Amino acid sequence: MAVHTIAARQVEVALAAGAEVGEGPLWDQREQVLLWVDIPRQAVHRFDPAGGVDTVSDVGQMVGAVALTSGGGLILALQEGFALFHSGQIEMITPIEADDSRMRMNDGYVDPQGRFWAGTMSIDESTQKGSLYRLDPGGEVTRMLRGIGISNGIDWSPDGRTMYFADTTPRTVDAFDFDGATGRISNRRNLLTFPSGGGSPDGLIVDAEGCLWVALWGGSAVQRYTPDGQLVLKVELPVAQVTKPAFGGPDRSDLYITTARRGRHDEPHAGDIFVVRGTGFHGQRIHRFPG
């Protein structure tokens, strides 16, 4: 199968953010804004592409992911656990591995039934002590996976029957059978394994056609794969540390991409947010956590 390439010269800088570790882009269709986080700077951002305004909220600790709630607030995967963020106030829901200062929460996403999934990792990235957790709307937390290196991108197929999950340390993206009624996962199998030297899988999303878009940390690209693991498209970036894509815009056909500046100060645009406008592909509807 031929691989189409979108060259770096076709990619625009949407926001000269200079983020230390920009992550977790998420399009709010109601407000037509892009939410994203800068993990070590403890910041949640709200970027309005129409006006070019980026509003920053300091949430007081490292933040790995942000998601929308049905009531208009946000739910966060903070270093110390799950929290609600509304009107500038943080309300902790439940601590996650908060007794171990060497750990923090990382990427997360809401499933089609409104559960928020997010995982943990060691701050110095030296261990495989991470886990993947599921936060149910009622507040119950369940540990779904153990022995994770860097818990990263997670999303679901359009029919809601398959969950995809990236672990950056072994450079893998795995697929699971997903039971929407119970939130259980089963039948884990490897979909993608990335060779050393070409970048490691970071954040990922699944588009409306069921294809995966995987950001490559150290690989200067976002790559699109069919559900059976065939590479069909590569978006080249002018920076090495690419963290996560997100579809946005009025019809969810613009591809926004966060990146990281950490350790790459030789790259003028490292840490900026990029956009590919009118890709011809469309993102799925973003699900919200009840509350």
Image (tube, rainbow, N blue to C red):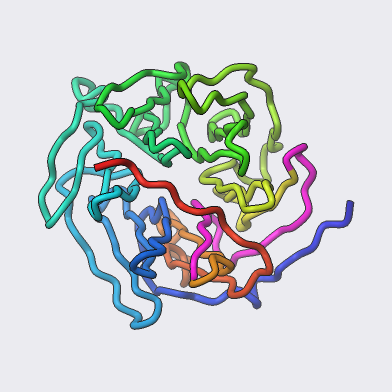
Q: Residue at x 12, y 57 (%)?
A: 87
Above or below, 99 relative to 125: above
Q: Residue at x 23, y 22 (%)?
A: 100
Q: Is residue 67 left or right of residue 97?
A: right
- The quadrant in which residue 133 appears is top left
Seen as rendered, the residue at the extreme front is 181
The quarter of the image holding the C terminus is: top left
Q: Residue at x 51, y 46 (%)?
A: 203
Above or below, 191 relative to 153: above
- The quadrant in which residue 43 appears is bottom left
Q: Position of residue 225 (x, y in %)?
A: 72, 47
Q: Position of residue 105 (x, y in %)?
A: 33, 34
> Looking at the image, which is closer to me, 220 or 287?
287
Q: Residue at x 62, y 32 (%)?
A: 162
> Looking at the image, which is closer to me, 28 or 231?
28
Query: How many marks are shown on the rendered structure?
Result: 0
Seen as rendered, the residue at the extreme bottom is 51
> Looking at the image, which is closer to me, 108 or 185?
185
Q: Position of residue 169 (x, y in %)?
A: 54, 31
Residue range (magenta): 227-249
Q: Position of residue 264 (x, y in %)?
A: 46, 58
> Looking at the image, which is closer to me, 137 or 276?
137
Above or below, 216 relative to 192: below
- The quadrant in which residue 103 appears is top left
Residue 233 part of the magenta-drawn span: yes
Residue 159 part of the magenta-drawn span: no
